[in-house]
Amino acid sequence: MSILMPKKVKHRKWFKGKSKGVETRATELNFGSFGLKSMETKWVTARQLEAARRNIIRYLKKGGKLWMRVFPDKPVTSKGPEVPLGGGKGAVDHYAFAVKPGRIIFELDGVKEEIAREAFRGAAIKLPVKTKFIKRGE
């Protein structure tokens, strides 16, 4: 089981930050012929990305090449249940990636369009964002 997380980080805990606006990076297909593009803003956790990736790989069997265009490097902290106020910020619980509208999450090549569409449909169910199937030249 490969859970996505950074090997080493400069700062162990981050501020929450503001997720506003549309994506300017990774909005075009660079590697594959088909892509899964985000249509809204959300934090996508490492577990959700891994579940979506596994779903695509399982559907493709052994054909095609998959690229993941996001990496969850944002540490999300949480305090245990029934912990009183005060006592500082909680420990790092998991990692996430702040997805904005227009960001390509996955790219796929080496398969027919119907197969890619089906594979991405299964993956989209695993993700918390609304997504759109795109292909090269669109």
Image: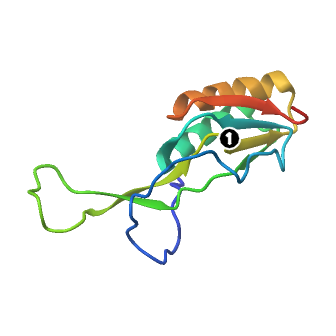
- Secondary structure under tag 1 reads loop
Q: Picture quarter containing residue 34?
A: top right
Q: Picture quarter containing residue 122?
A: top right
Viewport quadrant of the C terminus: top right
The residue lying at 43 percent from left, 58 percent from top is: 17
Q: Position of residue 18 (x, y in %)?
A: 45, 53
Q: Position of residue 114 (x, y in %)?
A: 81, 21
Q: Is 83 displayed left or right of 73 in the figure? A: left
Q: How is the image coloured?
A: rainbow
The residue lying at 71 percent from left, 54 percent from top is: 25
| Residue farthest toward the front in the current orientation of the protein | 21
Q: Position of residue 96 (x, y in %)?
A: 48, 53
In this rendering, the answer to whether 108 lies above or below 130 is below
Circle count:
1
How many residues crowd around disc 1 within 10 Å: few (fewer than 14), some, or many (20 or more)?
many
Residue placed under numbered mark 1 in the picture: 102
In this rendering, the answer to whether 90 lies above or below 42 is below
In this rendering, the answer to whether 44 lies above or below 123 is below
Q: Is 44 or 138 nearer to us in this picture?
A: 138
Q: Position of residue 79 (x, y in %)?
A: 22, 57
| Residue farthest toward the right in the current orientation of the protein | 137
| Residue farthest toward the bottom in the current orientation of the protein | 10
In this rendering, the answer to whether 81 lies above or below 38 is below
The residue lying at 70 percent from left, 51 percent from top is: 24
Q: Amino acid at mark 1?
A: Gly
